[in-house]
Image (cartoon, rainbow, N blue to C red):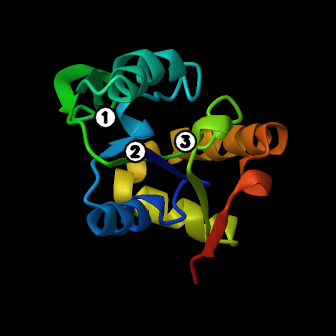
Amino acid sequence: MRLVAVDGPSGSGKSTYAARLAGELGAPVVPTDHFATWTDPVAWWPRLLHGVLEPLWRGEPGRYRRMDWSEGWPRLGEWVTVPVAGALVVEGVSAARRAIAPRLDEAVWVELPDPAERLARAVARDGEASRAHLERWQAFERGWFAVDGARERATRVVTVA
């Protein structure tokens, strides 16, 4: 299975890029938003690894419970089955993290240089009630990216204008 990660800051256009790429590859997309929460932005990784990636590497479907954000705050929601396919796209903040880098066939970094524009796009997507959470999230991800170095490891950098 070809494993592609699409990473980058919130509001940069990762989801749009990943959907297009997945369509070209005939691959399912697993968004990190199905795992992350405001209070757990990255420590959820074992759920993705054990529930999705390891079964797929064995040739078995993956399965996980996605976060349900329908009430404005995350809670465990429905089960999602990820079919065995020739490729998988994992999309979202921390998708190309150092822990998975050796197993990635491609790491795509999507960026929009203006942080104010990224925040405006994220608020437009998630609603004004999420603004304070998104501001904290963007502060967190700046630190995460500085330590993790996903952009530096990227095999492709896409700058959204």
**At numbered mark 3, what does the secondary structure look like: helix, strand or loop?**
loop
- Where is 78 relative to 145, above or below? above
Q: CA distance from mark 2 to mark 3?
A: 26 Å
Residues packed near mark 3 inside 10 Å, few (<14), some (14 to 19) or many (20 plus) = many
Q: Nearer the viewer, residue 35 or 119?
A: 35
Question: Disc 1 marks which residue?
Answer: 72
Q: How packed is label 1: few (under 14 Cα within 10 Å), some, or many (20 or more)?
A: few
Name the element at disc 1.
loop
Q: Are marks 1 and 2 in contact (CB under 8 Å)?
A: yes
Tell me how far mark 1 sits from mark 2, CA to CA: 8 Å
Alpha carbon separation for disc pair 1 and 3: 23 Å
Tags 1 and 3 touching, CB below 8 Å: no
Which residue of the protein is positioned furthest toward the bottom in this rendering?
161
Label 2's element?
Answer: helix
- Write down the residue under mark 2: 129
Closest to the camera, between mark 1 and mark 2, is 1
Asked if residue 65 lies left or right of residue 11, the reply is left
Q: Position of residue 7 (x, y in %)?
A: 57, 52
What amino acid is labelled 3 in the image? Ala
52 is higher (above) or lower (below) than 17: above
| Nearer the camera: disc 2 or disc 3 | 3
Write down the residue under mark 3. Answer: 95
Give the amino acid type for the residue marked by disc 1 in the picture.
Gly
Question: Of 161 and 74, which appears nearest the observer?
Answer: 161
